[in-house]
Image (tube, rainbow, N blue to C red):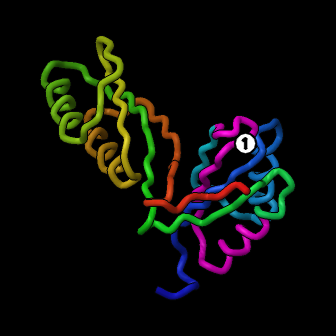
Amino acid sequence: MTTNEEQTHIIAAIVEHKPGVLYRVSNMFRRRNFNIESISVGPIEPRDLARMTITVRGDEKVVEQMIKQLAKLIDVVKVSRLHPENTVSRELALIKVYSPDTRARSDIINYVNIFRASIVDVSTDSMIIEITGDSDKLDAFIELMKPFGVKEIARTGITALSRGAKSIKIL
């Protein structure tokens, strides 16, 4: 693979957990005309810090520059690139699917079981399904649901950690 090839990169950042940090990080990407594919943020220990997992597409050179720029932001404590072969990544989706009759419900339930998903809500004409896994798994499940009629989708974006003993050291 050449360094000019555009690919997906996962960046993990430890940031101060306070108002305005997400805006400053996303604005830095915007100013450089770089699209964030997904971003997930949540508090960590110590509670005054948060972890951001940012998924972007680009070539090696551009992503390296983005990581350097991100590290310069005052609210960013630590930045690290996560390499796919050494990373566990997951995404969660809630998918509302039209289920007008017992046959459709039965088929949907079979797919839910095959994909190890869960039905978290049922109404007279729809179901909400919760599914967790890598993005390809979610995409495949959504494709299978399209013939039933997908009413609504909410996805969290990727969250990821390095495998094994390696971790982002804060200090």
Q: Going by the picture, which residue comes out furthest to the top?
A: 124
Helix, strand or loop at disc 1?
strand
Q: Quadrant of residue 55?
A: bottom right
Report x, y in % for residue 10: 56, 61
User: In the displayed structure, does residue 51 sit left or right of residue 129?
Assistant: right
Q: Is residue 90 left or right of residue 21?
A: left
Query: Of residues 79 and 125, which is closer to you in this image?
Result: 79
x and y percentages locating residue 53 in the rendered image: 60, 52
Instruction: List the residue tagged with mark 1.
Output: 49
Q: Is residue 71 above or below residue 104?
A: below
Residue appearing at x 65%, y 37% in the figure: 43
The type of residue carrying mark 1 is Leu
Residue 11 falls inside the magenta stretch: no
The residue depicted at 34 percent of the width and 43 percent of the height is 142
Q: Residues within 10 Å of mark 1 (few under 14, many from 20)?
A: some
Camera-nearest residue between 144 and 37: 37
Q: Quadrant of residue 163?
A: bottom left
Number of labelled discs? 1
Q: Say left or right for 112 vs 35.
A: left
Horizontal placement of 125 versus 59: left or right?
A: left
Q: Quadrant of residue 85?
A: bottom left
Q: Residue at x 73, y 74 (%)?
A: 65
Percent position of residue 108, x then y: 21, 31
Q: Is residue 29 above or below residue 137?
A: below
Q: Quadrant of the C terminus?
A: bottom right
The span picked out in magenta is 43-69
Q: Which residue corresponds to the image point at 63% horizontal and 42% vertical from the top-left?
A: 41
Identity of the residue furthest to the right in this view? 74
Expressed as whole percent of the image width and height from the top left, the position of residue 146 reads: 31, 40
